[in-house]
């Protein structure tokens, strides 16, 4: 509607004089009938009745800054969601007072459900919140789960190009490329590896055995034993490369002991294995580190062309100290078998056992079970059958000693030197039940300590002992104990001195006589009456051998006597029927000898030569003899003992500070 204007000149005055004044109220009252711009929309609904292109009936043209349809909305917010595209931020709309203030960021101004205020629904391919992020990368770490690789996001032009392998799309700290922290239980880099297997070798350290890894299924089922989880070349599945000083197989063993026999080749003695505590302390001497049956202390199998004990050849056996024992002057070893056990007994001034027990002036036996005769401290027990727990000042043990078994009881005899006398102690030690017996028979005169002691029992259970020495004050002591109780007295105790009583070796023989054998200008046999309270000893020379050592034992075949004759270069075995067996070579000069007989009549014989070498022989008079050297690891031999059952064998050698043992498998 056109409003009235001023008319020229007096006409106005004339009109004013003849008409009433039209007020704004009159104009407003007529607005519903007025359409000044002729656009067909009354002025009261037309937001600009002077412009025919603007009215509620006019289609809106977006983003031209004009509110053509008179809706009063911002012309740059087509979908009326309160956000405008970024390029229209701050632009006003003509006729709309509040326009130009809406925030930008609307990535689809035709869709009211797409704007920065909308919550984004991930994995539907639409960027509802117009963040510009790939809809398949929820945590925004630049990686998508594998099932969404290549899928594009509406409104995000560069989408669909992100790499996959995101194993947790809710956590932006978990994705490929992250530095994985081992042992926290998370597969942070989505590599699919067990987090407790840092080096990826398929094994975990024992501390993490069974622990599962988040994002990895299955996990927690890898085997343990990995000793270096930073290096894939160290694990229980790796073949060990020996002598490198590294434990590649993580077996915890010394790398220089390939056959795990407890010994290393000499070249590697003292070398430690990296990462394995306690290594580097194994002894050397292993001459074949590929065979655990070949090593020092191994059981030697004679004549098989294999040097099992690594003493330098198959023609010898090595006698080595039993580990764990310390000795002072062990002497006169005796070998005895009883109830499937083997005893090597000695007289010793002092012994410290593997259990740190200390015994003085002792009769002490080292014991094996038959079938387990090896030089291994773990398979050895002990029997201190006569001992003192303190170092006595009024007596000391002598060289003389004997040890036998009868009726499931062990019997031992020792010779002692007192301040002004000497004594013979006899001890019984039941192997089953019963009370041990002990009797000490002491002389009344000052005699030398016995060089030799021999022990025997008769059929009535009486115990006999004879002790002799060949010094300037030589004497022969004879003892009989009718009943060896816990604290028995000798029923007969007499000492004879003089030329016939002076002998360095003596032996009892109750089956032939009874008699005492003594090396007095040959071997003399002195008969006596065992029932007499004061027997006399009379006899003649029984053997012309220049015996430096005598030994006897009694079995079903009678009494067997073993004689060492250095001058003849022979060991002579006199069997119970009187048959004599001689063995030895031109290399030998036996001064001490011991023999053991098997059930088939063959022998194992051991002796010490005058040059301190030790030799053995096994066989029989019919089948012949095989000779072998005994290698002594240290010291000068002072005594020897032999035992065999035909399958196993022992050669025991004493020195001033050692009991050495060589073992055989026949």
Image: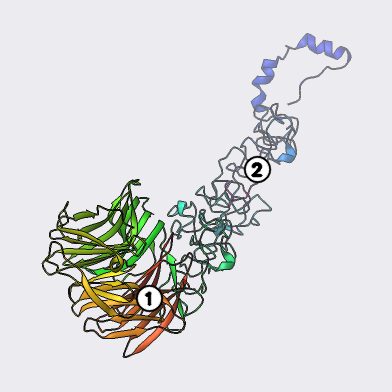
> Magenta residues: mostly which secondary structure?
loop
Magenta stretch?
A: 128-142
Q: In which quarter of the image is the N terminus?
A: top right
Residue 457: x and y in percent read 17, 67
Residue 311: x and y in percent read 49, 73
Q: Quadrant of the C terminus?
A: bottom left
Question: In the rendered image, is residue 445 in sight?
Answer: yes
Mark identifier at residue 285: none
Give the quarter of the image for residue 616.
Answer: bottom left
Left/right placement of residue 376 relative to residue 27 reads left
Residue 402: x and y in percent read 28, 64
Q: Is residue 480 above or below residue 70?
A: below
Q: Nearer the viewer, residue 23 or 204?
A: 204
Residue 443 magenta: no
Q: Nearer the viewer, residue 529 or 185?
A: 529
Asked which secondary structure carries label 1, the reply is strand
Question: In the rendered image, is residue 63 in sight?
Answer: no
Disc 1 crowd rating (10 Å Cα; few below 14, some 14-19, many 20+) is many
Q: Is residue 136 above or below residue 317?
A: above
Outermost residue toward the top in this view: 17
First in sequence: mark 1 vs mark 2: 2
Q: Is residue 572 above or below residue 337?
A: below
State the CA–CA distance, disc 1 to disc 2. Answer: 113 Å
Asked which secondary structure carries label 2, the reply is loop
Residue holding disc 1? 606
Outermost residue toward the bottom in this view: 622
Residue holding disc 2? 109
Pair 1/2: label in front: 1
């Amino acid at each position: 509607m056109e409003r009235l204007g001023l008319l020229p000149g007096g006409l106005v005055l004339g009109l004013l004089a003849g008409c009433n004044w039209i007020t704004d109220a009159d104009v407003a009252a007529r607005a519903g009938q007025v359409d000044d711009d002729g656009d067909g929309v009354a002025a009261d609904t037309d937001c600009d009745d002077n412009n025919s292109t603007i009215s509620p009936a006019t289609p809106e043209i977006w983003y031209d800054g004009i509110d053509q349809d008179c809706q009063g909305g911002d012309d740059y917010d087509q979908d009326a969601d309160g956000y405008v595209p970024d390029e229209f931020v701050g632009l006003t709309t003509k006729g709309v007072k509040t326009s130009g203030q809406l925030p930008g960021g609307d990535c689809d101004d035709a869709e009211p459900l797409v704007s920065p205020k909308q919550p984004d629904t991930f994995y539907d391919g639409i960027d509802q919140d117009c963040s510009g992020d790939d809809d398949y990368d929820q945590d925004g770490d630049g990686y998508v789960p594998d099932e969404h690789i290549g899928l594009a996001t509406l409104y995000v032009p560069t989408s669909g190009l992100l790499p996959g392998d995101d194993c947790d799309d809710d956590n932006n700290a978990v994705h490929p490329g992250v530095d994985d922290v081992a042992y926290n239980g998370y597969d942070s880099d989505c590599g699919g590896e067990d987090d407790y297997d840092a080096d990826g070798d398929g094994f975990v350290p024992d501390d993490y055995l069974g622990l599962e890894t988040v994002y990895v299924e299955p996990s927690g089922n890898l085997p343990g034993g990995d000793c270096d989880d930073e290096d894939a070349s160290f694990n229980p599945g790796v073949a060990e490369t020996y002598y490198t000083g590294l434990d590649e197989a993580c077996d915890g063993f010394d790398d220089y002991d390939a056959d795990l026999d407890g010994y290393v080749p000499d070249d590697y003695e003292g070398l430690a294995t990296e990462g394995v505590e306690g290594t580097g302390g194994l002894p050397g001497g292993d001459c074949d580190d590929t065979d655990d049956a070949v090593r020092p202390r191994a059981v030697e199998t004679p004549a098989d062309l294999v040097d099992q004990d690594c003493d330098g050849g198959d023609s010898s056996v090595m006698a080595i100290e039993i580990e764990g024992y310390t000795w002072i002057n062990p002497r006169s070893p005796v070998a005895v078998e009883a109830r499937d056990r083997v005893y090597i007994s000695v007289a010793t001034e002092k012994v410290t056992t593997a259990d740190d027990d200390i015994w003085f002036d002792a009769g002490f036996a080292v014991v094996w079970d038959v079938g387990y005769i090896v030089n291994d401290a773990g398979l050895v027990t002990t029997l201190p059958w006569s001992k003192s727990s303190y170092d006595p000042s009024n007596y000391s043990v002598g060289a003389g000693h004997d040890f036998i078994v009868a009726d499931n009881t062990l019997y031992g005899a020792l010779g002692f030197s007192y301040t002004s006398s000497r004594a013979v102690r006899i001890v019984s030690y039941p192997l089953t039940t019963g009370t041990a017996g002990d009797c000490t028979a002491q002389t009344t005169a000052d005699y030398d300590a016995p060089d030799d002691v021999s022990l025997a029992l008769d059929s009535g259970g009486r115990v006999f002992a004879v002790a002799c020495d060949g010094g300037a004050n030589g004497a022969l002591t004879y003892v009989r104990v009718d009943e060896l109780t816990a604290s028995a007295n000798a029923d007969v105790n007499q000492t004879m001195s003089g030329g016939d009583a002076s002998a360095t070796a003596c032996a009892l023989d109750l089956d032939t006589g009874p008699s005492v054998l003594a090396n007095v200008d040959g071997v003399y046999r002195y008969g006596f009456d065992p029932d007499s309270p004061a027997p006399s000893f009379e006899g003649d020379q029984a053997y012309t051998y220049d015996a430096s050592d005598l030994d006897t034992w009694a079995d079903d075949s009678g009494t067997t006597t073993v004689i060492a004759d250095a001058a003849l270069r022979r060991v002579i075995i006199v069997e119970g029927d009187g048959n004599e067996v001689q063995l030895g070579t031109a290399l030998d000069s036996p001064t001490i000898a011991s023999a053991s007989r098997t059930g088939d009549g063959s022998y194992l014989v051991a002796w010490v030569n005058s040059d301190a070498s030790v030799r053995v022989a096994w066989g029989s008079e019919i089948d012949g003899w095989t000779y072998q050297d005994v290698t002594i690891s240290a010291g000068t031999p002072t005594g020897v003992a032999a035992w065999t059952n035909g399958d196993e064998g022992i050669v025991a050698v004493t020195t001033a500070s050692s009991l050495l043992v060589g073992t055989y498998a026949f």
